[in-house]
Image (cartoon, rainbow, N blue to C red):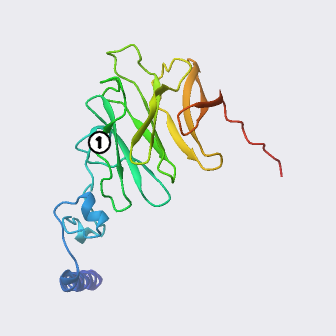
Amino acid sequence: MKKNIFEILSKSILLTLFIAQFSFSQNNFKTWTQTTVSDFSANKLSDLIITNVTDGEVQLPRCLIKKVEDHIDDSLFRFVAKDGAGNFVRTWTQGNNIFVKKYSAEWKEVTKSVQVNEINGVTGDLGESRAAIFDDGTYIVVWSNLASIIGQYGDMYGQIYKDDSIKVGSNFKINEKYNSSACHPVALANDSDNNFWILYNLNVTPDAHKIYIQKRDKSGAKIGETFFPKPSKQHSI
């Protein structure tokens, strides 16, 4: 009986000390009711609620709840390509079209929004685009036409721009075989040969895909034949 009383008293004292310490420390903590991307990126954390603090495991609510699909939210800088000085271009889908805009390293708009695709309404709601840029300001935008209203469904296209979004040539088709799996191309500004490399995959059989690589110069002209990447040699130790 004495042992049980001792245990009860010990737990009561420890709990009292914990509550006192927690109450004393409350002045050093903030509580939040809700959090946003801005709160986290600015390192403020002024709108988040901390729960379950007395049960030994702090619980935080989910910080990010997607309200709008990323690819159709113009406010999200998702598809971005930067040059060596920090200037960048970003692309997005809006109204079944692909748009691009250029910014300075200080995030100030250098150009207005430019519609990339020449045939209106070809990208569909799920259309995605990518960009790549060289330090001289020349950049490329690539995308897939996924709208069913025209006879180009699945075709991949690209467009070259120079300086402050001055168009070079016209939209050019990338894929040479039908893009039945509706895949999206990506682009790389390759400093080693000063050309754009476009990578994409196509299904060669119903159950097999292959990665294709196509090179384009800064005028958009195709260089050589589209080729497959070669596997690296493996050495045993």
Quarter of the picture holding the N terminus:
bottom left
Q: Residue furthest left?
A: 33
Residue sitting at 18 percent across and 60 percent down? 34
Residue sitting at 19 percent across and 80 percent down? 26
Front residue (pair 193, 20): 193
Q: Position of residue 33 (x, y in %)?
A: 16, 63
Q: Position of residue 187 (x, y in %)?
A: 52, 40
Front residue (pair 62, 19): 62
Residue 7 figure quarter: bottom left
Above or below 103: residue 130: above
Q: Residues within 10 Å of mark 1 (few under 14, many from 20)?
A: some
Front residue (pair 39, 87): 87
Q: Which residue is mark 1?
A: 113
The residue type indicated by label 1 comes to Ser
Circle 1: element type: loop
Left or right: 164 as drawn, with respect to 194: left
Residue 37 figure quarter: bottom left
Q: Position of residue 131 (x, y in %)?
A: 45, 42
Front residue (pair 32, 217): 217
Q: Is residue 212 visible to us here?
A: no
